[in-house]
Amino acid sequence: MTITTEFVIRSPSLPLVALAESISSNQVECVHGLCRERTARVFVVYLDPDDEVSADELAALDEVTDVTPFGRASGKDVYQVTLELADVVSDAFAPERFTASQVEPTVVTPDGWYEKKLFQNYNAFNGMRTRCEEYGIGVELISISQNPPEDDDSSQYGLTDRQQEALQLAIGRGYYESPREVSTQELAEEMGISQPSMSSLLRRGERQLLTAALGSQPEVKALSG
């Protein structure tokens, strides 16, 4: 079951952040192919006309190697920009480790890149986050939501969507490792609920899984004397 995530990535190596810092809106929208193609270097950039950024000014940026104006669309000035990415960025987003689909354009701000992406599951997102952190790129999860299945069948284990989301998050974040790598308080913050609610979701989900697994076993009757 896929998940939709919203997160911010931060690194001094990220391109276009300096541009966002230099314009009055402090915001640049772009569409890119990172996470899907290792050689992705072409970004489509959307700028507010009020920021008055020209093609020459874009070309003057250190990371930009080519600029093609596309005109104006939906009230934005659109450019195709070819970038020279830092090795840590292209390696961190290598698609052979994980895949993700861009749900909305990336929003570049002075604070970093705001992303909204679709992942196959939480483990796929966590793999991306771990990979980024290995290369010194910080990832702050803002929100995560589980997308409904394509059919109306209930979970084969009888879990509610919320229980399944909680369990997947706990597994992905190392809650069931020994020693535990995350607390229920941290899990609760990621799901936007209280710590008691998180603990309750996990307990009820665990109990349902055990009931589904063990309850289907044939009953063993004691031998009569």
Image: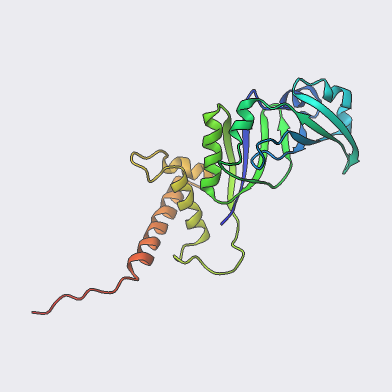
Q: Classify 149 as above or below 143.
A: below
Q: Quadrant of the N terminus?
A: bottom right
Asked whether 214 or 55 is in front, the reply is 55
Location of residue 190 in the rendering, given as x and y in whole percent from the top left corner: 53, 43
Q: Classify 192 as above or below 213.
A: above
Q: Quadrant of residue 129?
A: top right
Query: Residue at point 63% right, 26% down?
Result: 87
Asked whether 171 or 127 is in front, the reply is 127
Q: Classify 187 as above or below 1.
A: above
**Any part of residue 85 in sight:** yes
Please state the total of marks drawn on the protein image: 0
Asked whether 162 or 177 is in front, the reply is 177
Q: Is residue 50 left or right of residue 124?
A: right
Outermost residue, bottom direction? 224
**Any part of residue 192 in sight:** no
Outermost residue, right direction? 71
Q: Is residue 58 left or right of residue 165?
A: right
Q: Quadrant of the C terminus?
A: bottom left
Q: Classify 37 as above or below 120.
A: above
Query: Residue at point 42% right, 39% down?
Result: 182
Location of residue 17 in the rendering, given as x and y in whole percent from the top left corner: 72, 26
Location of residue 64 in the rendering, given as x and y in whole percent from the top left corner: 78, 25
Location of residue 37 in the rendering, given as x and y in whole percent from the top left corner: 67, 40
The colour mode here is: rainbow
